[in-house]
Image (cartoon, rainbow, N blue to C red):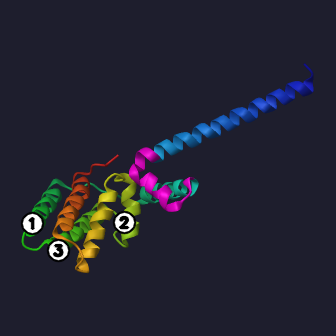
Amino acid sequence: MSTNSLIAVIVVAAVVVIALTALLWTLARRRHLRERFGPEYERTIEERGDKRSAERDLRAREERHDRLDIKELSAGRRHQYADEWSGVQQEFVDRPEGSVERADELVTRLMGERGYPTEGFDDQLRDLSVEHGRTVEEYRAAHAVKVRSGAGKATTEELRGAMVHYRALFEELLSDQRSR
């Protein structure tokens, strides 16, 4: 085999190795994002219409989340929040709309105390999606009902569903569990 042929084979082999390495890295990163974000991964792809753009967005969320100072609550604070949640649920029988409003406020306050920014609902969703990708959709649904309720357009059954959705995220945030 001539020197030129040997060099050509080595160059082709190097290109193939580099391409395979890049492919494996991309697949591993994609699997990581799917596992971390759960249903939010597919939702973001659908929303963006492009897998690369969606994955850039999800990586940006991770980077932003890494800069947050997320804290655990003391046992005493968890107990206080749990008691307050019980009161919100008891209020539902007599005032379902007000109860859903209070549930939203309580979840937002809990997020803030844990260290999540609480300005802007879309930003809340992005920040929560990193560690709570499986329950962020429930938060989204609960918030939509709360908005319709404010306009007088939510049924009692929808309000009950919103409370269930709020509770799912509330319990995760309160216990410091992640939905991954």
For the residue pair 66 and 106, the one nearer the viewer reads as: 106
Cα–Cα span, label 1 and label 3 = 14 Å
Q: Which residue is mark 2?
A: 124
- Which mark sits nearer the N-terminus, 2 or 1? 1
Which residue is denoted by mark 1 in the rendering? 87
Going by the numbered disc 1, the residue's amino acid type is: Gly
The residue lying at 22 percent from left, 51 percent from top is 175
Q: Secondary structure at mark 1?
A: helix
Which residues, given as a range, are shown in magenta?
Answer: 34-51
- Quarter holding the N terminus is top right
Location of residue 126 with respect to 23 vertically, above or below: below
Question: Which residue is at 10% across, 74% downward?
Answer: 95
Can you give x and y, in whole percent of width and height, for residue 22 in the image?
Answer: 64, 40
Most prominent secondary structure in the magenta stretch? helix
**How far apart in space, not on screen, are marks 2 and 3 (Cα)?**
22 Å
Front position in the image: 27 or 95: 95
* Residue closer to the observer: 74 or 121: 121
Q: Nearer the viewer, mark 2 or mark 3?
A: 3
How many angstroms separate mark 2 from mark 1 (CA)? 24 Å
Residue 72 left/right relative to 83: right
- Residue 97: mark: 3
Question: Label 3 amino acid?
Answer: Glu
**Residue 39 vs residue 157: left or right?**
right
Q: Residues within 10 Å of mark 1 (few under 14, many from 20)?
A: some
